[in-house]
């Protein structure tokens, strides 16, 4: 997983640096063609890109100092990745007019459209590791959520079972199985929308729950999750 993460970041940096040489600033005019409504629609669509950050919190029981390490991990990675996302978006929309971007393979096709085929091949090959790393990240967090829910009595006790390496094996198998079934039955566009709205709802419920805990519990705020 660490190797694939390094490969992913390398590919993204390659897209930003190599693509910057092909940026035509006239492609950014109009800069916001669909107005505020378009921004909100786009934000709702790409919300799933930030799913991995809530997965970091599922490792709270596995780090030495969660009070210090988790905020650093979440805020640090969020800042780095958001910067990379924004830079990549600027470069791609600068390379190709937004109406001509290939939605099936926007990064690799952008280089093909400007005549750089070798860069297109590199990006296409590197994209395969991105999908794999995303799958691993999802399978890291969800089983641990099931594990904690089982410990709290909210799920079957079988989800508490750990392998010899401390991995919640039942949760991992169930998560992988359901992910495979949904991938077969539903188109990617529908899955993206379901994941985005589901993640947004989960974040909203958790944030509301934290506020309720802070007002109902007499403990100091620092002692509330």
Image: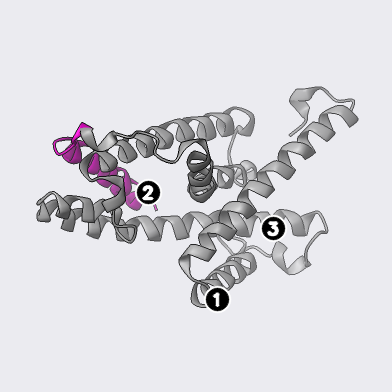
> Is 24 colored magenta in this rendering?
yes
In this figure, which residue is indicated by the disc labeled 3? 147
Mark 3 burial class by Cα count in 10 Å: few <14, some 14-19, many 20+? many
Considering only order in the chain, which callout, 3 or 1, is on the residue closer to the N terminus?
Answer: 3
Considering only order in the chain, which callout, 3 or 2, is on the residue closer to the N terminus?
Answer: 2
The picture places residue 19, in percent across and down from the top left corner, at 19, 40
21 left or right of 92? Answer: left
The picture places residue 163, in percent across and down from the top left corner, at 60, 65
The picture places residue 100, in percent across and down from the top left corner, at 26, 52
Q: Residue at x 51, y 44 (%)?
A: 50
Kind of element beneath mark 2 = helix
Task: Give me the C-alpha separation between circle 2 and circle 3.
Answer: 24 Å
Q: How is the image coloured?
A: one colour
In the image, the segment drawn in magenta is 1-25
Kind of element beneath mark 1 = helix
In this figure, which residue is indicated by the disc labeled 2? 2
In this figure, which residue is indicated by the disc labeled 1? 181
Task: Give me the C-alpha separation between circle 1 and circle 2.
Answer: 27 Å
Q: Quadrant of residue 176?
A: bottom right
């Amino acid at each position: 997983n660490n190797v694939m993460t390094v490969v992913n970041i390398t590919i993204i940096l390659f897209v930003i640096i190599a693509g910057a040489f092909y940026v035509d600033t006239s492609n950014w005019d109009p800069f916001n063609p669909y107005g505020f409504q378009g921004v909100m629609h786009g934000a709702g669509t790409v919300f799933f890109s930030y799913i991995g950050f809530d997965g970091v919190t599922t490792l709270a029981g596995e780090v030495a100092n969660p009070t210090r390490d988790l905020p650093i991990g979440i805020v640090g990675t969020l800042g780095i990745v958001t910067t990379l996302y924004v830079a990549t978006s600027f470069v791609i929309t600068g390379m190709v007019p937004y109406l001509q971007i290939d939605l099936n393979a926007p990064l690799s096709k952008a280089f093909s459209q400007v005549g750089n085929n070798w860069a297109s091949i590199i990006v296409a090959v590197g994209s395969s590791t991105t999908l794999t790393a995303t799958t691993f990240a999802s399978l890291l967090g969800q089983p641990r959520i099931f594990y904690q829910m089982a410990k709290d009595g909210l799920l079957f006790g079988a989800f508490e079972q750990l392998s010899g390496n401390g991995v919640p094996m039942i949760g991992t198998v169930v998560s992988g199985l359901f992910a495979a079934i949904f991938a077969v039955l539903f188109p990617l566009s529908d899955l993206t929308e379901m994941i985005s709205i589901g993640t947004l709802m989960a974040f909203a419920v958790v944030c509301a729950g934290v506020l309720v805990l802070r007002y109902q519990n007499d403990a100091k705020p620092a002692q509330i999750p």
